[in-house]
Image (cartoon, rainbow, N blue to C red):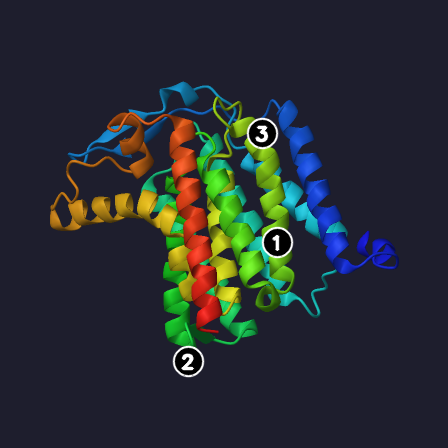
Amino acid sequence: MLYGLLSKHIADRFVVLIAAGFAFLLTYVLLVRPFGFLPRDGGKFVTDAKGNKVEVNKASNGKVTGVGILMILVFLLSILLFIPITMAYDKCFVIMLALTVVMMITGYLDDAAKAPWGELIKGILDFILAVIAAITFVIYNSTDVQLFSLHFHIPKVLYVILAVALIWGSINVTNCSDGIDGLCGTVSIIELFAFAMLFGAQLGKFSVMAVIMSFVLVAYLAFNWTPSKVLMGDAGSRAIGFLIAILAMKSGHPFAFLPLSLVFLFDGGLGLLKLAVLRVFKINLFKNVRFPFHDHMKKNLKINNVGIVVIFAICEIVMVVLTGVVLHVFR
């Protein structure tokens, strides 16, 4: 809408900066005094060393949660106002944008439910959306990928299977890491910027998604840093995890997801692995470690929230730098 007016006078990169600034300001204004309809946090449970569910982060009980609905709507509005998209030429972009919103809606409905949805329901919904996204991607994009200096083609059926696993995994590890103030938001900002910087040419308009979401998250952190006033809830974390997976696929370097999301994979992914192995094989892996790992750092290692976020942020920055170096060497 506004792109047509602005593009006549300034370069596209400045239009993107204006869109990002608009997203930051609107998110900040909306979170100063969150709407009364938003739900309240009802507690968070993790798996302890014995495989039992234990309540953690009791201090979050009663806080406004589900503000991810505001964040994703601002993200959507910013793109619609400032980024030129048409269904005729940007079908994949439009569909992925719509699926991000649907992911937010499913997360928000869980946040707002009196009784949290079970793992089965959420897993099925994630799987359905992942399948739709994967099929959409192979319809409109090449399945040629790059690993270091190697270029190879993945058959579409195999690509869909791998993409579903990537999307489902990204959604859930990102969600698992949203357990202490500032952690998910901070690591997500670094990773989203990394995709935009490292793969800007390949991502095209999708890099704009990464930049705008990053600025939304910066505004969110103003209210989520310890001690937090609001929580993004599943409405935010699940949509962000979905977006990260789509960026990895669109970049043409889907394997870059592994180093760039290593912090999320380590923090939340190992917990999912432990739970799966425990349920299927009755084997208690890492029995002396709490998961997500940030909970182990807080409860067992006695590291405060800010310290945990700083450690994870440094680790994420290191992985981004290493990924950038590898891409440069093997380009």
Tag 2 and tag 3, C-beta contact below 8 Å: no
Residue type of the residue flagged with mark 2: Phe
Residue type of the residue flagged with mark 3: Ala
In depth, the one of 70 and 226 nearer the eye is: 226
Residue type of the residue flagged with mark 1: Met
Quadrant of res 59: top left
Mark 2 surroundings: few (<14), some (14-19) or many (≥20) residues within 10 A: few
Q: Does residue 129 appear anywhere in the picture?
A: no
SS class, disc 3:
helix
In depth, the one of 292 and 326 nearer the eye is: 326
Query: What residue do we see at 31% from left, 28% from top?
Result: 298
Cα–Cα gap, marks 3 and 1: 21 Å
Tag 1 and tag 2, C-beta contact below 8 Å: no
Cα–Cα gap, marks 1 and 2: 27 Å
SS class, disc 2:
strand
Query: Which mark is on residue 152?
Result: 2
Q: Position of residue 10 (x, y in %)?
A: 83, 56
In depth, the one of 216 and 106 nearer the eye is: 216
Mark 1 surroundings: few (<14), some (14-19) or many (≥20) residues within 10 A: many
- Number of numbered callouts drawn: 3
State the residue position of label 1.
Answer: 209
Q: Earlier in the sequence, mark 1 or mark 2?
A: 2
Q: Residue extending furthest left?
A: 282
State the residue position of label 3.
Answer: 222
Quadrant of res 160: bottom left
